[in-house]
Amino acid sequence: MRFHDKAVIVTGGSKGIGAGCAKVFCEEGGLAAILARGRETGERYAAELTARGPGRAIFFQCDVSQPEQLTAAIDRAAEEFGRLDCIINNAGWHPPATRIEDTSLEDLDRLIRLNFTSTFLGCRHALPHLRKTKGTIINMSSMVGILGQDQAVAYCSTKAAQIGLTKALAVELGPEGIRVNAILPGNVDTPMMHEWAATLPDPKSALQRVAALQVFGRMATSEEIGRIALFLASDDASFLTGQAIQAEGGASLDY
Ligand SMILES: NC(=O)c1ccc[n+]([C@@H]2O[C@H](COP(=O)([O-])OP(=O)(O)OC[C@H]3O[C@@H](n4cnc5c(N)ncnc54)[C@H](OP(=O)(O)O)[C@@H]3O)[C@@H](O)[C@H]2O)c1
């Protein structure tokens, strides 16, 4: 019960990695606010987590790329639980493979708004609530933010920007006892991963190829990333801040 009666906001908490985070925090007695666009999936998942206990979850409909929606949802969640101990800025999207010449400025702006600006605003708007609890911030970046990836300049740029934000903010908030860390997942078995595979001619072999990249011969589960987030949010990580935790199952080893 490492998060008993403490409150977390998980953007994109209705599916994939965010859903794994919400599940792990609820299993530890936490109160999870799930923010996403799809109401039906979000409400169903929040009800499922609450029924399973011992923590509970509530869904708040919100498009994180719309600043007013994100700030309103953060305030409603903090009000509902009466406190906020952690925000996990996780909602994001990986567009299909696109070369730089085919990446329009409009597409770039949209992706920055979804993957990066929402992370910035999530940090900024959660801050008054986190100050009261000496809470923590976790930003869901990606290994490709430091490794690069073919035909993904826009995505990799947004993920690298999240790392810069994490480190700078950790310096700024350290004196107040607020820790800021990023998780850089490698390949995680999520709906987004399957949507990406479906854009390729042979989705099944694409997923097998991706699984084989890790030294374990498999992708991470969303819950495994959730357990890293729980560690970062707990007092066990009390001396960790500004870190970019590479959760990649050894995929970058043995080059
Ligand atoms: N999967 C991987 O291998 C991997 C690797 C490295 C990093 N990541 C990062 O991890 C994060 C989650 O990825 P995932 O694979 O779990 O994705 P996913 O399976 O597509 O799940 C995304 C979640 O975010 C929500 N979401 C998407 N756009 C949103 C928006 N505009 N406003 C609010 N919620 C939104 C989705 O719900 P709705 O659609 O209902 O809004 C869903 O709950 C992303 O930031 C991604 O870059 C993933």
Image: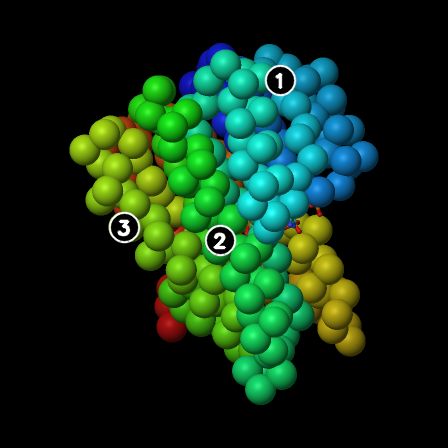
The residue that label 1 is drawn on is: 56
- Of 49 and 201, nearer the camera is 49
Measure the alpha-carbon separation of dots 1 and 2. 28 Å
Kind of residue at disc 2: Thr
| Mark closest to the chain's N terminus, 2 or 3 | 2
* Helix, strand or loop under label 3: helix
Give the residue drawn at x 40%, y 60%. 161
Mark 3 touches mark 1? (CB < 8 Å): no
- Camera sees residue 243: no
The residue that disc 3 covers is 168
Task: Kindly identify which residue carries mark 2.
Answer: 117
**Residue 202 visible (yes or no):** yes
Does label 3 point to a residue whose CB lies under 8 Å from ligand 1? no
- Residue at 44% across / 29% down in the picture? 86
Q: What kind of residue is marked 3? A: Ala
Spatial separation of the CA atoms under disc 3 and disc 1:
33 Å
- Horizontal side, residue 142 vs residue 253: left or right: right
